[in-house]
Image (cartoon, rainbow, N blue to C red):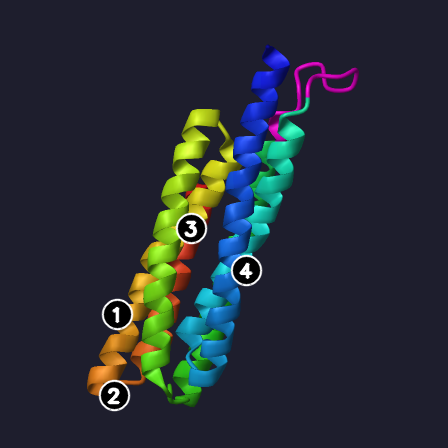
Amino acid sequence: SRRQTRGFMMDIKAKAALMSIASNTLLIILKTVVGIMTGSVSIISEAIHSGLDLLAAVIAFFSVRVSSLPPDERHRYGHGKVENVSGTIEALLIFVAAIWIIVEAWGKLVNKTPVEMVSYGIVVMLFSSLANLLISNYLYRVAKSTHSIALEADALHLRTDVYTSAGVLVGLGVIYLTGWQVVDPLVAIGVAILIIKASIGL
């Protein structure tokens, strides 16, 4: 029946959103700990990026639950538009965070604080890239099959994380091989620019 189909679709979308929440929570913890240990502003910027993705995943989780509710007296055409609203909120949040990252990276350029224990950062960023790639691909499939704007927005955030984590990984590799500390804040600024681009697109 139509009600059973709607319930099945809601379960699929809710499961996908919960997986994103779990993944982002783990990555935030790892990136924050390693970012503090190493003193890397690019890793910290990635932790912030994951924090915003966690917020986006939570918003997506609640929006897909609300959007699946049947029409009522106040919402005669259903609740689907809540996903559009959540996507806009997510875009604004990641834009603000990108500006904050640029300010922090500029401070690192001026103060020239060195990055330590680079190998730990390399391992975490490699894990982050792979985890986000797997989760984002899953979210995209669910978003397309269920026509969920909120999940598609969440998938976009995670796909951006794949590229930014890979960029930070390369930057840390350069620091490890050459000792060029200036690479760290420059990569962080690059991450912020990509985040801004993603927020505008969203």
Q: Nearer the viewer, mark 2 or mark 4?
A: 4
User: Which amino acid, by three-letter code, is at mark 3?
Assistant: Leu
The mark lying in front, picked from 1 and 4, is 4
How packed mark 2 is, by other alpha carbons closer than 10 Å (few <14, some 14-19, many 20 or more), is some
Q: Residue at x 56, y 24 (%)?
A: 8
Q: Could one spot residue 96 in this view of the protein?
A: no
Where does residue 85 sit, x and y in percent of width and height? 61, 36
65 shown above or below 75? below
In the rendered structure, which disc, 1 or 4, sits on the residue that comes first in sequence? Answer: 4
- Spatial CA distance of label 2 from label 1 is 13 Å
Tell me: residue 154, above or below residue 145: below
State which quarter of the image contains the N terminus.
top right
Residue at the extreme right:
73
Secondary structure under tag 3 reads helix
Q: Which labelled disc corresponds to residue 170?
A: 1
Inspect the magenta stretch and tell me whether residue 146 lies in it: no
Q: Which mark is residue 179?
A: 2
Residue at horizontal 20 percent and vertical 85 percent from the top: 178
- Sequence-wise, which precedes: disc 3 or disc 2? 3
